[in-house]
Image (spheres, grey):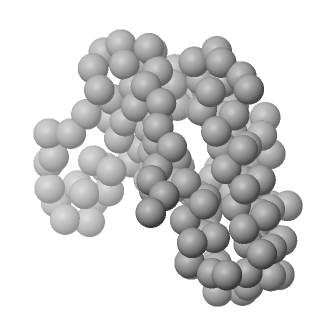
Amino acid sequence: MTDYALTTTVESGFADTVAATRAALSEQGFGVLTEIDIAATMKTKLDLDLDLAPHLILGACNPQLASQALAAEPSVGVLLPCNVVVRTLDDNHTLVEAMNPAIMSQLSDNPVLADVAGQALALLTHALQQLNGRSS
């Protein structure tokens, strides 16, 4: 089975990493459709005060790839958008994880989905590499 997440650790604080993640995703054609602050959501929905370091889920979508995937297999919408998690490890290190789009192609034998997943994987991988100044 394919790992379900692409991961990188950034030597930067949370706020700077969130901004850099948004920029890197945008450069690869992804927009952020949703944003979930885990601690704030747990407080609002369950009145829980979690002792949780900053932890944000960004729902990222590349409209071109999403439209190709949905045209090939409409039910793939349950896997969209691609979640990208940004969470604090300590004051100077932040973890960024993105859903591995290859999961999509493992759930279907549709060759179009495999192609779209491959393209999305390349773009997300490049975005995460940009966060540490590496590019492929």
Q: Residue at x 80, y 45 (%)?
A: 29
Q: Quadrant of the N terminus?
A: bottom left
Most foreground residue, 135 or 33: 135
User: Visible in this render: residue 35?
Assistant: no
Most foreground residue, 40 or 89: 89
The picture places residue 65, in percent across and down from the top left corner, at 80, 62
Q: Residue at x 15, y 46 (%)?
A: 50
Residue 57 vs 110, above or below: the answer is above
The picture places residue 64, in percent across and down from the top left corner, at 85, 61
Q: Is residue 36 left or right of residue 78?
A: left
Q: Quadrant of the C terminus?
A: top right
Q: Residue at x 80, y 82 (%)?
A: 72
Residue 76 vs 134, above or below: the answer is below
Q: Is residue 1 left or right of residue 80?
A: left
Most foreground residue, 31 or 64: 64
The picture places residue 4, in percent across and down from the top left corner, at 45, 56
The picture places residue 77, in percent across and down from the top left corner, at 64, 78
User: Visible in this render: residue 76?
Assistant: yes
- Total numbered circles: 0
Quadrant of res 127: top right
Q: Residue at x 37, y 36 (%)?
A: 87
Most foreground residue, 112 or 40: 112
Q: Is residue 80 left or right of residue 117?
A: left
Q: Is residue 20 left or right of residue 116?
A: left
